[in-house]
Amino acid sequence: WLASFADPQLTAAVDEAMLHNADLRIGASRVEQSLLLARLAGARLYPSVDVLGRGGGKMSGDNSGLSGVSLTVGWEVDLWGRVRYGRAAARADAASTQADFQFARQSIAARVARSWFLAAEAALQADLARRTVGDAEGLVRLAGDRARVGVGNEEDVFAARAAVGTYRDSLREIELAREQAIRALEPLLGRYPSGAAAVTPQLPAQSTEVPAGLPSQLLERRPDVIAAERRVAAAFNRIGEAKAARLPVIGLTAGVSSISSDLFVLKDRDNPVWSFGANLLMPIFRGGALKTQVEIRTAEQKEAVGAYAAVGLQAFGEVEAALSAELAARDREQILTETLADNRRALEIVQSQFAVGSTDLRFVTQRQLGLLATESALIRVQAEQRVQRVNLHLALGGSFAAPSP
């Protein structure tokens, strides 16, 4: 969706944020940790193999005089699926963390785009303020000429100069707003907030119209929706793991050892010695801890299902809000465009009347302020359209095109 704005500088800025944003680095580390935890959870499905060696001369390391080597193998028979449930839950947790990271990437891209548009809007507002200052300075000169030829007075001159001061103050405030917008953008790019980033001083072309009949299935690709669904899956597996923990644990063991001593005479036996065995651990009474653990996991599962429903409703709400806001901004742009043309014509007429002495400066100033307000509102609405389009793409989890199977 970023390419739909056809702004190479904006695309480059988002690419820079993907590489250097500090929050994304944290998110990438969390993904790595979750994948390792998933691998660790599945390790108990495989046998454990250990080797123990002893040595150190006649007295050995512990003064026992024994030396040798032993190899032991142990394996828990996962009859009830406790370990498999744990592994599945860890994998679902890892998938949810990965989806959270993808949503963070999309959110950072959207924040960069929104900050970019706000900085561009501030640049356009500053350009408008500069033009207004120039027009006001022209009125000062015209008021002075009128006073010299006797069709004006000194009050008009001072009023025109005061208006220039007011416009200059507004210009400085807008320039500060642009600096602050750029400083808000730079940390997203991983830069020091110096206010020196080069932002295109214009809004990109508005992308295509929103196609009618967008399928609700588009929301299923939203990473936060996927993350919530994976947390539900993890919660269900945690319940199975807790229930299986109430059943017996069966383990198989095997080993081979060879022991010798230069200090003691050991009993005659075959060397090496092989051993095989099994063990069973049956939980009988643990103060209700195992039952409570199942109840805790069940409550967590209910929480995960509720959170999944909440994320779904939030997704629909964000889509509707972005659509309605963009539609309203588009309607306002049309209204303001027509109003702007009327204000410009009215200002031209009153300026001509002021030049020939048929009206005073107050009417010129009023028309000038009306034109400034309308043009400023038009710039703001145009920027708002682009911001809401970004919000819509973020709400949909991507572009308007349906994801490939």
Image (cartoon, rainbow, N blue to C red):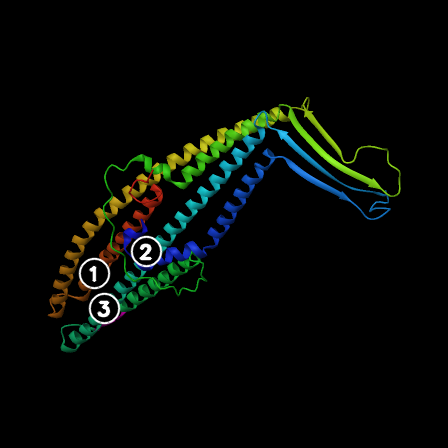
Q: How many marks?
A: 3
Query: Which SS does the magenta portion mostly show?
Result: helix
Q: Mark 2, residues whose alpha carbon is within 10 Å: few (<14), some, or many (≥20)?
A: many
x, y percentage for residue 236?
Answer: 50, 29
Q: CA distance from mark 1 to mark 3?
A: 12 Å
Q: Is residue 131 left or right of 73 when viewed as pictured?
A: left
User: Above or below — where is 126 with respect to 46?
Assistant: below
Q: Quadrant of the C terminus?
A: top left
**Label pair 1/2, CB-CB below 8 angstroms:** no
Q: CA distance from mark 1 to mark 2?
A: 30 Å
* Residue range corresponding to the magenta coloring: 154-161
Q: Position of residue 310 (x, y in %)?
A: 41, 34
**Would you identify the image quadrant in which residue 153 lies?**
bottom left
- Horizontal arrangement in the rendering, residue 272 relative to residue 77 (left or right): right
Residue drawn where x is 84% and y is 48% of the image: 57
Residue in view at x 26 percent, y 52 percent = 381
Three-letter amino acid code at the position of disc 3: Ala
Mark before the other along the chain sequence, 1 or 3: 3
Residue 231 lies, in percent from the top left, at 48, 35
Query: Which residue corresponds to mark 2?
Result: 117
Q: Which mark is residue 173?
A: none
Disc number for residue 366: 1
Which of the two discs, 3 and 2, labels the residue nearer the N terminus? 2
Where is residue 331? Give x, y as percent. Answer: 21, 46
In the foreground, 170 or 277: 277
Amino acid identity at mark 1: Gln
The answer to whether 325 is drawn above or below residue 124 in the figure is above
* Identity of the residue drawn at 53% across and 27% down: 298
